Image: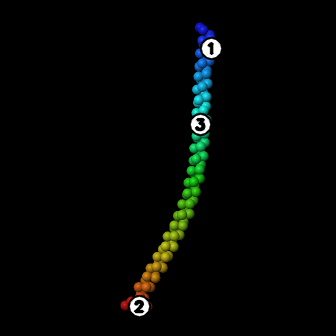
Amino acid sequence: MDVEKTIEFILEHQAKTDTQLEAIRKLIRVGMRMIVRIGQAQERTDQQIAKLTDSQARTDVKMAELADAQKVTEQKFQALLDTLRENRNGHERS
C-alpha cells in the first residue's frame, strides 16, 4: 500500500468535496434569498388585495345608494309624466 498515493487521493477527494459543498452553500443562499423575496412579494400582494377588498366594499355601498336614488328619480319622473298626461297644455284629458 502506497501511503503517499492514499494521502493524495484523500486530499483530492477532500478538495472536490469542499468545492461541491461550497456550490451547495451558494445554492442554498440563493434559494433562501428567493424565498425571502417571494415572501415579501406575497405580503405586498396580500396588502393590495386587502385594499381592493375595502375599495370594492365601498363601491358596493355607493352602488346600492345610487340604485336607491335612481328608484326615487324614476318614481318622480313617472309622477311627472302622469301629471303631464293628465294636464296637457293646461287642459284635462277627457
**Above or below 46: residue 65:** below
Residue at image location 58% in from the left, 40% down from the top = 34
Image quadrant holding the C terminus, namely: bottom left
Q: Amino acid at mark 1?
A: Ile
Q: CA distance from mark 2 to mark 3?
A: 87 Å
Q: Amino acid at mark 3?
A: Val
**Above or below 5: residue 70:** below
Local crowd size for mark 2, using a 10 Å CA cut-off: few (<14), some (14–19), many (≥20): few
Image quadrant holding the N terminus, namely: top right
Q: Is label 2 in contact with label 3 (beta carbons under 8 Å)?
A: no
In the image shown, does 82 or 19 lie closer to the viewer? Answer: 19
The disc label shown at residue 30, or none: 3
Residue at image location 58% in from the left, 33% down from the top = 27
Q: How is the image coloured?
A: rainbow
Give how far across and how far down residue 72 sits, in percent: 50, 76
- Residue extending farthest left: 94
Tag in front: 2 or 3: 3
Q: CA distance from mark 3 to mark 1?
A: 34 Å
Give how far across and how far down residue 19 sits, in percent: 60, 25
Give how far across and how far down residue 79 sits, in percent: 46, 81
The disc label shown at residue 92, or none: 2
Give how far across and how far down residue 85 sits, in percent: 41, 85
**Above or below 11: residue 81:** below
**Above or below 7: residue 76:** below
> Circle 1 sits on which residue?
7
Residue 82 located left or right of residue 54? left
Residue 14 occupies quadrant:
top right
Q: CA distance from mark 1 to mark 2?
A: 121 Å
